[in-house]
Image: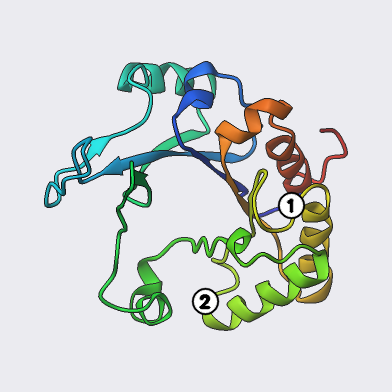
Amino acid sequence: MRSVKLHLFLLCVAGVALLGHQCCVEDNIDFHFILGFAIDADPSAKPQNGKFSPYWADTLTPNSVEAIKERHPNVKALASLSGWSLGDEALRCTTVLPYIELFIKYGDVIDYVNHQFYTDKVRSPKGYLAAFQLRATQFDKDKLLPSYAVNGRGIQGDAFSDALNLLEANIGFDVNGVMIFSADASSSNNYYYERKSQAFLTNSTSV
């Protein structure tokens, strides 16, 4: 068992998995459900100048979140701002400074960095390791989260677990957190990668 605090970050595009209590939650891991998305636009994609509205399941209410937290006190729910699109209109959350410069300036108040390695289109464990080593020079490697997209463009299948092993073996990186996108895609395979990532974090062999 690792002695550090463990985290699993799971993005729920519609909040269905969180609502249905379906996703397996290990009690000894900080399980962060990130609800996607709260967008400062109306349904026709007209900007609302900072007034954010939720675009997840209507039945996902504060009471339903509270019910889940009663079953799993280690669950944390938070909202992702923007980062999605409505219809043909792309809505992006932009920053004044490039991400690297932003981290250099405000890294002391940034808890974690989700680089979204699944957009780098690396498909092998060794390629993932090289991509992580590059980003580790740009961000604090201890705040940099290995990430995986279910049915995504990047590394797929059990090769992701092999990549996690390479991270620990080659750069002395203690994997104490994983980001997975998304719970909605995971529902079709009984949340295999969420289960496997939690097993990896707890050094367990069961999935």
Q: Which residue is mark 2?
A: 139
Q: Nearer the viewer, residue 61 or 120?
A: 120
Is residue 22 at all visible to an observer of this figure? yes
> Is residue 109 shown left or right of residue 195?
left
Residue at the image position 66 percent from the left and 72 percent from the top: 132
Say if 34 sits above or below 128 in the image: above
Q: Amino acid at mark 1?
A: Arg
Residue at the image position 71 percent from the left and 63 percent from the top: 174
Q: Residues within 10 Å of mark 1 (few under 14, many from 20)?
A: few
User: Which disc is residue 2 wearing?
Assistant: 1
Is residue 27 at all visible to an observer of this figure? no
Check whether the beta carbons of the residues at disc 2 and disc 1 lie within 8 A of each other: no
**Residue 133, quarter of the rendered image:** bottom right
> Is residue 109 shown left or right of residue 152?
left
Residue at the image position 76 percent from the left and 76 percent from the top: 171
In what element is the residue under mark 2?
loop
Q: Amino acid at mark 2?
A: Phe
Q: Position of residue 191 (x, y in %)?
A: 69, 31
In what element is the residue under mark 1?
loop
> Is residue 81 shown left or right of residue 41?
right
Q: Position of residue 123 (x, y in %)?
A: 76, 62
Say if 6 sits above or below 53 in the image: below
Q: Position of residue 40 (x, y in %)?
A: 20, 46
Q: Quadrant of the C terminus?
A: top right
Q: Position of residue 114 (x, y in %)?
A: 51, 60
